[in-house]
Image: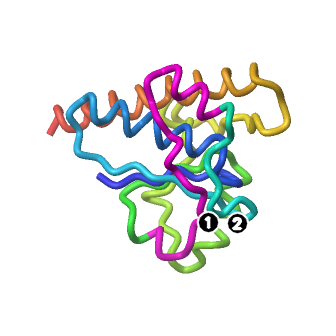
Amino acid sequence: MKILMVCLGNICRSPLAEGILQHKASRAGLNWTVESAGTNGYHNGEAPHHICQKLSKANGIDISNQRSRQINKNDFASYDVLYAMAGDVMRDMTKIAGDKFEASNTKLFLEELKPGHQMDVPDPWYGGEDGFIEVYELIEKNCDKIIENYLNKTAAL
């Protein structure tokens, strides 16, 4: 399975989600490729935010080699699932995709935790370290749910 995590600038939420889910999927024996992108190109080529790197490293995950990139139309055909970190990101993704947008493989990230609820992963960019910790924990919890949901679906087949 190939998964793309998407946020606004691709230096906070989506790099965390990429690193955490890739780590957890590998530990679960799942041959997944998890990557990330942003809807804008303001930070193209930059490493994840230093606090995101610090939190990930403290949890045994190295995201320091990730580099920000902007999502493009072709990504919508290249990934099995595209997760938007927030509603505004989803709206931007819809515009970027144009005729390539597929609602069947694009969803809000937190729908895994609370199906039917439109919840956003808060953007920690303007806050302090506590906001980054809260976002890390929320993403980690949802990544566990993504794997659990996937394993339950495949077991039922």
Q: What color scheme is it?
A: rainbow
Q: Which residues are magenta?
A: 52-76
Q: Are marks 1 and 2 in contact (CB under 8 Å)?
A: yes
Residue drawn at 43 percent across, 59 percent down: 104
Q: Position of residue 133 (x, y in %)?
A: 66, 21
Residue at (50% x, 26% y) in the render: 140
Q: Is residue 108 magenta?
A: no
Say above or below: 10 vs 144: below
Residue, x 53% and y 42% (percent of image)? 64
Q: Which quadrant would the C terminus be assigned to in this image?
A: top left
Q: Secondary structure at mark 2?
A: loop
Q: CA distance from mark 1 to mark 2?
A: 5 Å
- For residue 2, side relative to residue 84 (left or right): left
Q: Which residue is mark 2?
A: 41
Task: Kindly state the secondary structure of the residue where label 1 is placed.
Answer: loop
Q: Amino acid at mark 2?
A: Gly
In this view, the residue in front, 100 or 135, is 135
Label 1: which residue? 70
- The answer to whether 36 appears left or right of 135 in the picture is left
The part of the image, by quadrant, that contains residue 149 is: top left
- Residue 93: image x %, image y %? 63, 64
Instruction: Work out whether residue 35 or residue 154 is closer to the camera in this orientation and state it.
Output: 35
Instruction: Answer few, some or many: residues within 10 Å of disc 1's Cα (few below 14, many 20 plus, some between 14 and 19).
Output: some
Of pointers 1 and 2, the one earlier in the residue sequence:
2
Quarter of the rendering containing residue 22: top left
Amino acid identity at mark 1: Gln
